[in-house]
Image: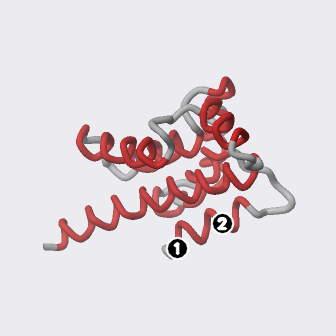
Amino acid sequence: MGKNLENAKIIRNDPDVHYNCAQAVLCAFAEDCGITKEQACGIGANFGNGMKMAATCGAVTGGLMVLGLQGVDDTPTIGAFLRAVRDNHSGCLNCGDLLRMNKEKGGKQKPHCDGMVYEATELVEKILEERKASADL
């Protein structure tokens, strides 16, 4: 488990503060991105709950924000990130659809959303590690 995933788990289980999915992913990488946790929370504030309208999952948008802050903006890499999430969730990226499908399977919202945060965090960690490894060659 990478340090960012550990951070995401701590953030999602903070009993005193509710971080939306976008905030949780972005906060998990804040230090690596050169921003404070408070800045990350502000940036991600309107991206939770699928941009507050059940659109693109906050964990996905949080992951895209981290990748952008880390200079990863090439179409093949971003496409691979989005495909990986879609492939794990019956082709869906939208919060409303993901929550509906989870509920139909008898799942609860918090564990589902936690899982989305952890999945996005792991995917971003993997992309960044691969980039670093290829840059070190």
Q: In the figure, is residue 41 to the left or right of 119?
A: right
Residue ID for mark 1: 3
| Residue kind at label 2, given as amino acid type | Lys
**Whether residue 37 is situated above or below residue 2 in the rendered picture:** above
Report if the CB atoms under discs 1 and 2 are less than 8 Å apart.
no
Of labels 1 and 2, earlier in sequence is 1
Closer to us: 45 or 57: 57
Q: Circle 2 — which element? A: helix
Dot 1 alpha-carbon crowd within 10 angstroms: few under 14, some 14 to 19, many 20 or more: few
Q: Position of residue 127 (x, y in %)?
A: 34, 59
**Whether residue 58 is situated above or below residue 12 in the rendered picture:** above
Q: In the figure, is residue 65 to the left or right of 75?
A: right
Tell me which corner region of the image, top left, top right, bottom left or bottom right, holds residue 99: top right
Q: Residue at x 45, y 36 (%)?
A: 91
Q: CA distance from mark 1 to mark 2?
A: 10 Å
Q: Nearer the viewer, mark 1 or mark 2?
A: 2
Q: Residue at x 59, y 40 (%)?
A: 58
Q: In the figure, is residue 65 to the left or right of 98?
A: left
Q: Position of residue 75 (x, y in %)?
A: 25, 38
Residue closest to the far front: 105
Q: Position of residue 84 (x, y in %)?
A: 39, 49
Residue ID for mark 2: 9
Which colour scheme appears in the figure? Answer: secondary structure
